[in-house]
Image (cartoon, rainbow, N blue to C red):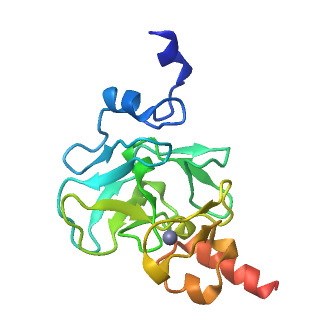
Amino acid sequence: MSPAATAVSAPAYTGHLTNGDPTKAAKSYKPTHPGKFEVQFRDGEYNSCLVALQDYSKGETIAMMSHASPSKAIRYSTVQVTENDHIELNSDLLYCNHSCSPSVHFNVSSPDPSKWHAEALRDIKQGDVLEFFYPSTEWNMSQPFDCSCGAGNKCLKRISGAKYISPEVLNTYVVNDHIKRLKANQQQNA
Ligand SMILES: [Zn+2]
């Protein structure tokens, strides 16, 4: 094993870009869901994206989150699954970027982790970019960012987690049960 390979320590998914450039990542890339979707590597950190390799009907399961593992740390790459728990996806789903007008929902509302999955929020065509709404899982994000998703007046501009979104706006999105509970709690304590 080369020193470079050792530096990207297992068992974490090694496709992501924080340790290298997209060209390098593209060369060693092995799709985790061949035939279903794949990463398109683009220059610049966080510019790569996930693209559908088949059509999906609204409501259809795109992939189970069977590669996921619990994470103690909260990172840009983790997904929040309860009030207190976070996971690393350890798969190409990591490249499912944020959109304020998402095509995908990360459904982690089941108490049974084996049921967690990504599903189509609308009909998706082969070649479409797969994106989800980060505040549908994240309450208080470790790395807020200015959004340029291009969703017109639907774009929330600053994405920091569901904690910072009004209940009226949040209600227009499909979000997970832990986010609904946290928002209800926040309202009660306001
Ligand atoms: Zn946006």
Location of residue 185 (image quadrant): bottom right
Residue plotted at (18% across, 60% down): 126
User: Which quadrant: the C terminus?
Assistant: bottom right
User: On screen, 109 above or below 142?
Assistant: below
Q: Nearer the viewer, residue 75 or 22?
A: 22
Q: At which x and y percent is residue 109? A: 50, 68
Between residues 8 and 25, which one lies in front from this camera angle? 25
Q: Quadrant of residue 102?
A: bottom left
Q: Nearer the viewer, residue 174 or 5?
A: 5
Q: Position of residue 81 (x, y in %)?
A: 56, 60
Residue occupying image coordinates x 51% and y 74%: 175
Q: In the orientation shown, which residue stands out farthest toward the right?
A: 189
Does 37 appear above or below 2? below
Quadrant in the picture for the N terminus: top left
Rendered residue at 24%/68% (across/down):
124
Viewed as shown, does residue 173 lie left or right of 118? right
Q: Is residue 46 left or right of residue 142?
A: left
Count of labels in the image: 0
Residue 113 position in % (x across, y down)? 48, 55
Q: Is residue 19 above or below residue 80?
A: above
- Return the x and y of residue 50 as percentages of the image width and height: 34, 52
- Above or below residue 36? Residue 17 is above
Residue depicted at x 58% and y 72%: 157
Q: Is residue 17 left or right of residue 61?
A: right
- Furthest residue toward bottom: 168
